[in-house]
Amino acid sequence: MAVASPHLPTPGRQRRNVLAPVVLLVVFGICGLITLGQVTSSIGIVAVAVGALGALLPVSLVAWAFLWVDRWEPEPPRTLLFAFLWGACVAALSALIINSSAVLVADEVLGQGAGDILGATIIAPVVEEAVKGAFVVGLLVFRRREFDGVVDGIVYAGLVAAGFAYTENILYLGRAFAEDEALTGQAAAVLTVLILRGVFSPFAHPLFTAMIGIGCGLAAAGRFGILRLFYVLVGYLLAVVLHALWNGSATLGGGEAFAGIYLFVMLPLFVAMIVLVAWQRRREQRTVAAQLPGFAQAGWIAPSEVGLLSTLAGRRRWKRAVREHSGREAAKAVSEYQSAVTDLAFLRSRMARGAVGPQARRWHDERLAALIAARARAVGRPEALTAAWGHTPPSGWSPPTARPADWTPSPYPPPGWGQPGGGWGTPPSGRSWSPPGR
């Protein structure tokens, strides 16, 4: 059965793909302008400019790190951009309003000065992690197909937190600049804050919110609703606790307490996060490699491409060779083809675990159509699927050819179809299902 490409325009898809981003950008812009106005009224426009320039260094490092992590299955660039803007604009403004209001209430009820302490140690962690995590949870609920596991959750949470930290750093760096009138004092104050926040702790906010991302990633891979909710709640509570420890040690404990939390809690946790990401990336590689032989048997990819698609190094060599032989457009076509293969591999792995639900069939058809379309574009580029082997193709290899217009790929359902929790459940009537051997 031929499947319509998910990229073909329809009125409904046009409204979703154009109007929704426009509305979101307007909301982000309004929140950003209000936040900018609030900060400017507090420290002045020159201080804001200094803070914005100084904050570019740590945010660039953090954003690059999360994009580097997101290499096996790159998430949609527009969604990643919205994640950053949510943190920098919506979450920052929401936290500013709620935190300030709560501090005023605490001062009124508990006495002057109580609001500052409660604000730093309790109010800020609870509020800030909630408004940052709202974007990640929203993706899990409304755009669940964007979630394939823990790495995706960490990447989205990290970019939201990076945006939030960028706005926060503008305030801290600008305030340090504004509090000293001498030029040398201003430079020293800004440099001190930049070292503390941009060198020693640029990953503080991303580390906190990554707990929510991990919870959402586990929820996306889970099969039971109650367990999914549990994962998200535990992730949020961990984020709040870590944030409260960090703020509390700086506010109440003095230098020794802060150094202890930094050395014995945050640094080990940061190392553990690196280990977790490395393990998950290796797991992603094994997931893709396990699916590729079945793809070749079904006729979706060429058997000679299995080895090249199984590792990031092989994919990079392939794209580099294509770029050298056929130019950037051909390399872009191959890159899109590789991404489409990965998308389908991850989806089929989730389906095999029964972690997708009733929309599995539709998502599978859409991703398969995207893969076939991407391969057709790559085949249409001279040497796009052949340049990676140079002058010595693999044994038994023959150049791929474009598929006939009426060609229909084998459906090849995932392992376990027709069994409880097997992804598709009972195969549809009136359609031949004869999966190749694995």
Image (tube, grey):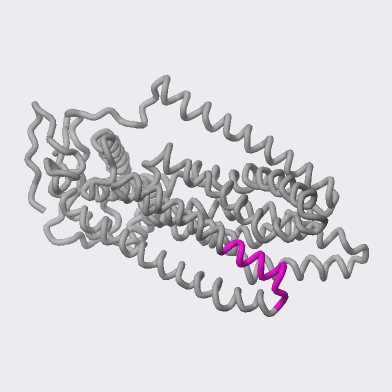
Between 437 and 149, the one lying in front of the other is 149
Quadrant of the image occupied by residue 28: top right
**Can you name the residue that lies furthest to the top here?**
11
Instruction: Report the residue at 67% width, 57% height from top.
Output: 56
Give whichever of 38, 16 is nearer the camera.
38
Residue depicted at 21% across the width and 53% down the height: 291
Residue 217 in the figure: left or right of residue 380: right
Image coords of residue 40 (percent x, y): 81, 47
In the image shown, does 39 or 346 lie closer to the viewer?
39
Q: Residue at x 37, y 59 (%)?
A: 316
Residue 382, percent from left and from top: 31, 45
Q: How many marks?
A: 0
Q: Is residue 391 left or right of residue 94?
A: left
Would residue 250 be visible to someone looking at this image? yes
Tell me: residue 279, above or below residue 301: below
Characterize the magenta stretch by its predominant secondary structure.
helix
Say which of 406 and 156 sits in front.
Answer: 156
Q: Is residue 264 left or right of residue 302?
A: right
The image shows residue 286 at horizontal and vertical percentages of 26, 61
The answer to whether residue 335 shows anywhere in this view is no
Residue extent of the magenta highlight:
242-255
The question of residue 251 being in magenta is answered with: yes
Q: Can you tell which quarter of the image residue 402 is in?
A: top left
* Above or below 266: residue 298: above
Indicate left or right for 261 with 293 as reference.
right
Is 75 a magenta residue?
no
Relative to 357, residue 59 above or below: below
Look at the image and tell me in which quarter the N terminus lies. top left
